[in-house]
Image (cartoon, grey):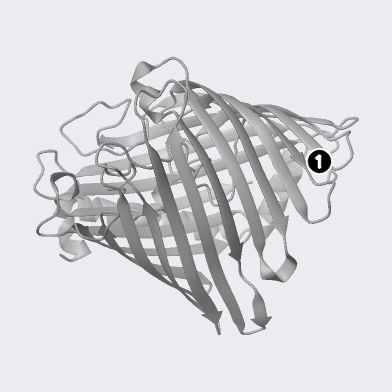
């Protein structure tokens, strides 16, 4: 099915109008270089060195269309604006603080979200008219080669597979936590911390006990080796006890540059996950993540396979990961099916006239490869205008296999148009 035919006529007209207005606003602002400098100066209180601190500003507009064919809810259409407004203090005797407010406003509520609660439409996981304290943290760097950071903060470890901020959603996920980063040994970065609460993308709070350890050794141009351990326990909501787990892994990753026209890309990762503490289930499961590719004359191609195993009752899960970035942008497999999932995918990317283009193909099966779930086709175009402005067009089309199990049936299409201003 063509994208143009996937949207109702009224929706297509609204979408084209919104898209055009967004592009015009972003590109017009981007050309006002002198205006940008005035804003930058004002946000630093007229001091280029930021000795009085700095106000931060981020405005993100997004149109999202979501439709799963053959299901009762109507296609969802969401027009949302997200504002983040913060203040970063100057560094005083090794101490620095940051506070950030976040608000999401829905100009169009034809979707089922935590605040809209409109089951007539498909789900778009962005609250409407919701505001919160997104970040409030304090850092201390008075110990050589060590940074201590405590409070509500954004945490992104490695590729965000296990602990990330779910930055794709309008409201990100943040953590009430302490994180210590040490680089006293050459080429070695050690991160150790503890997460006591998770502030979710729906502006809800999950109480946890989560010690974490992530150790990264850098081999220079060859890449990095990473070892990690995450001990996740949900402490209050009994419905979440089944997500408590202990996860260990090792990861090799790199993009060695051969010459100015050629670079190689590789990932080899193994992870192990088992039940932990108050989890009523008993399991021990594996995850495999392999990727190989190259960039030649500005064109990047990658072939990859990620497999998360299941035993028919439980599966390898990543409840704190930025899962939208994995297993297809249509979000059909945010939670791993009980029989696991194997995602064989191919990525092609390049830059044309200053715009970044990406195409990804996915083939989904169970972890044995014997049960077909479906295929997915993802396409994205992004373009930045100077330092502070960007636009994005994004499309995902999941095609269910004719014999797919019930949870993987029904084709899904999603469309996004986004404009961002960030200072």
Q: Which residue is mark 1?
A: 46
Residue 249: horizontal and vertical position, in percent? 55, 48
Question: How far across and down, in percent of the image, does residue 29 sit?
Answer: 56, 55
Q: Specify whether 302 is left or right of 107.
A: right
Indicate the position of residue 373 as horizontal and vertical percent values.
20, 56
Is residue 12 visible in the rendered image? The answer is: yes
Relative to residue 76, is residue 402 depicted above or below? below
Circle 1 crowding by C-alpha within 10 Å: few under 14, some 14–19, many from 20? some
Vertical comparison of 413 with 230: above or below? below
User: Residue at left 65%, top 57%?
Assistant: 225
Provide the secondary structure element on which disc 1 rests.
loop
Residue 364: image quadrant is bottom left
Q: Is residue 95 left or right of residue 177?
A: right
Which residue does the image show at 39% across and 46% down from the upper left? Answer: 62
Seen from the viewer's position, the closer of residues 404 and 311 is 311
Q: Residue at x 57, y 62 (%)?
A: 385
Q: Quadrant of residue 218?
A: bottom right
Q: Is residue 164 among the parts visible in the rendering?
A: no
């Amino acid at each position: 099915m063509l994208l143009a035919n996937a949207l109702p006529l009224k929706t297509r007209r609204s979408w084209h109008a919104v898209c055009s207005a967004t592009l015009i606003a972003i590109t017009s602002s981007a050309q006002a270089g002198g205006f940008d400098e005035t804003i930058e100066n004002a946000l630093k209180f007229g001091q280029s060195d930021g000795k009085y601190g700095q106000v931060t500003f981020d405005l993100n507009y997004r149109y999202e269309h979501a439709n799963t064919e053959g299901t009762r809810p109507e296609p969802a259409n969401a027009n949302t604006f997200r504002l983040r407004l913060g203040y970063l203090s100057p560094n005083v005797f090794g101490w620095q603080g940051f506070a950030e407010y976040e608000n999401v406003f829905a100009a169009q509520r034809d979707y089922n979200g935590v605040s809209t609660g409109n089951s007539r439409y498909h789900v778009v996981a962005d609250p409407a008219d919701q505001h919160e304290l997104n970040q409030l943290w304090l850092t201390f760097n008075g110990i050589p080669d060590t940074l201590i950071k405590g409070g509500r903060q954004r945490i992104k470890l490695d590729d965000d597979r296990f602990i990330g901020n779910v930055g794709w959603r309008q409201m990100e996920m943040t953590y009430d936590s302490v994180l210590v980063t040490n680089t006293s040994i050459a080429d070695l970065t050690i991160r150790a911390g503890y997460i006591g609460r998770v502030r979710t993308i729906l502006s809800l709070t999950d109480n946890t006990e989560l010690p974490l350890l992530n150790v990264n050794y850098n081999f220079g141009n060859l890449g990095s080796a990473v070892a990690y351990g995450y001990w996740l326990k949900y402490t209050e909501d009994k419905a979440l006890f089944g997500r408590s787990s202990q996860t260990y892994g090792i990861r090799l990753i790199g993009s060695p540059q051969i010459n100015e026209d050629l670079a190689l890309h590789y990932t080899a990762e193994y992870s192990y996950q088992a039940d932990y503490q108050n989890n009523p289930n008993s399991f021990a499961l594996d995850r495999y993540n392999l990727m190989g590719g190259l960039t030649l004359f500005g064109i990047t191609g990658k072939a990859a396979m990620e497999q998360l195993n299941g035993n028919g009752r439980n599966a390898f899960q990543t409840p704190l990961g930025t899962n939208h970035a994995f297993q297809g942008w249509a979000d059909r497999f945010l939670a791993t099916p009980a029989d696991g999932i194997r995602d064989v995918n191919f990525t092609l990317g390049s830059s044309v006239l200053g715009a970044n283009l990406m195409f990804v193909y996915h083939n989904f099966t169970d972890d044995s490869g014997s049960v077909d779930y479906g295929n997915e086709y993802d396409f994205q175009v992004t373009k930045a205008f100077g330092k502070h402005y960007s636009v994005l067009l994004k499309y995902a089309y999941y095609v269910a296999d004719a014999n797919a199990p019930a949870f993987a049936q029904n084709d899904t299409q999603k469309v996004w148009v986004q404009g961002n201003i960030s200072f």
